[in-house]
Image (spheres, helix red, strand yellow):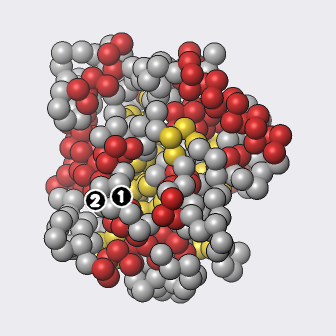
Amino acid sequence: LSQGRSFSSARLDDDNVPIIDCTHLFSKNDCSDKLISQVREACVNWGFFQIVNHGIQPDIIRRFQGQTRAFFALPQHVKYGLRRTVDNSRGFFDDEFTKRKRDWKEGLDFGVTPLCRSKGAIDFTLKDAPDDDFRHSNLDGFNRFPSEEQAPGFKRAMWNYFIAMTHLAEQLSEVMALGMGVQRDFFNEQLRHTHTSFLRLNYYPVLEKEEEEEATAGGGYEKGTLGISPHSDAGFLTLLLQDDDCHSLQVYNRFNNEWQTVHPIPGALTVNTGDMAQVWSNDRYHAPVHRVLANTEKIRYSMPFFYNPGYNTEVKPIERCVDTEGNYPLAYDPVYWGYFRWQRYSGDFADFGREVQISDFSKTNHKMRQEERIRHQDEFMNTFDGGAKIQSAGT
């Protein structure tokens, strides 16, 4: 693996992140060295890149976007009837915290459940069990979709898009594995066969000056409100579909210490590496800090797909990525995804104090705090049976 810090051979503009052509991504025999190199360098230097020719059918995207807009146009009482709770991370929300600051947005989260996976393929449209059936329950809780009467065709459009994102994420994870110097199927057990991914629909309303003043005066928001405060994504990778004409997403450029606006290309998807990819790669891949600006002129929709490991997955630096005598000594103690996910959601739901970070598992962290975090993680995983909800898993 190259230890250099040169920028990706993928196209770089002064005002944008790398753009990578994925024409050969789905070919088992034609995943070119050029594509592997471009993805690797983008993950090393930026942690953000846009992909074109990704293979997702335009009709799937169009129906998905239409249903997303229709959902947020539903009456408020319908959406509030789908609200997530302290022991269910899935459902509607308009009160999320990021890094202990309240976001200016509405959202809906839904994802994989044990029952929809047990049918041989992920299918949210199962009619033999309601969304809140105990067989759907897992660490993240259960999905809360509007009914077919409330939102005709919504669940089917969500399922079609979720499946397309899953397949794309599987292929990208193979290329990322090759970029780490391991076999392309290295992540099959931790990701492909056991992933606990979820999809988020985001709606960012226009932030009028009067609304900002009212929100900061008594609505729980801080001055200088952001759509989402600076953060890195917790999982392995994120696939983002966003509006072409509202450029509010920014990534922190650690080379010049400036915020860089991501200008989406029509038809492209934005990819960013997550915390778990950074741990597995032993800090070779970078999980970038990013944020969303509150917009004073345009509403914005964005739909990130979070490709996450299985709850019982032990994430630790890959041996191939460790160089004890070079620039990459062993950087982390093992992180269990179920524990990390539970801790991160606790910070999303409310301001419970300091949010968990991969730095808590760093070998360079304060020894006492590191040992306390590892002990807490071990206690959690010893009581976690793979099917418990978030609240019960944390007691």
- Label 2 vs label 1: CA separation? 5 Å
Percent x, y of residue 61: 24, 54
Q: Amino acid at mark 1?
A: Ser
- The amino acid pointed to by label 2 is Gln
Circle 1: element type:
helix
Give the residue at x 48% y 64%.
Answer: 320
Q: Position of residue 44 (x, y in %)?
A: 52, 72
Find disc 2 in the rendering and name its residue: 171
The label on residue 173 is 1
Res 368 quadrant in image: top right
Q: Residue at x 35, y 74 (%)?
A: 36
Q: Position of residue 99 (x, y in %)?
A: 69, 46
Up the image or down, 210 lies above or below 107; here it is below
Image height check: is 125 above or below 69?
Answer: above
- With respect to residue 122, does 29 lie above or below? below
SS label for mark 2: helix
Look at the image and tell me whether residue 325 can be seen: yes
- Position of residue 45 relative to residue 299, above or below, is below
Q: Residue furthest top?
A: 134
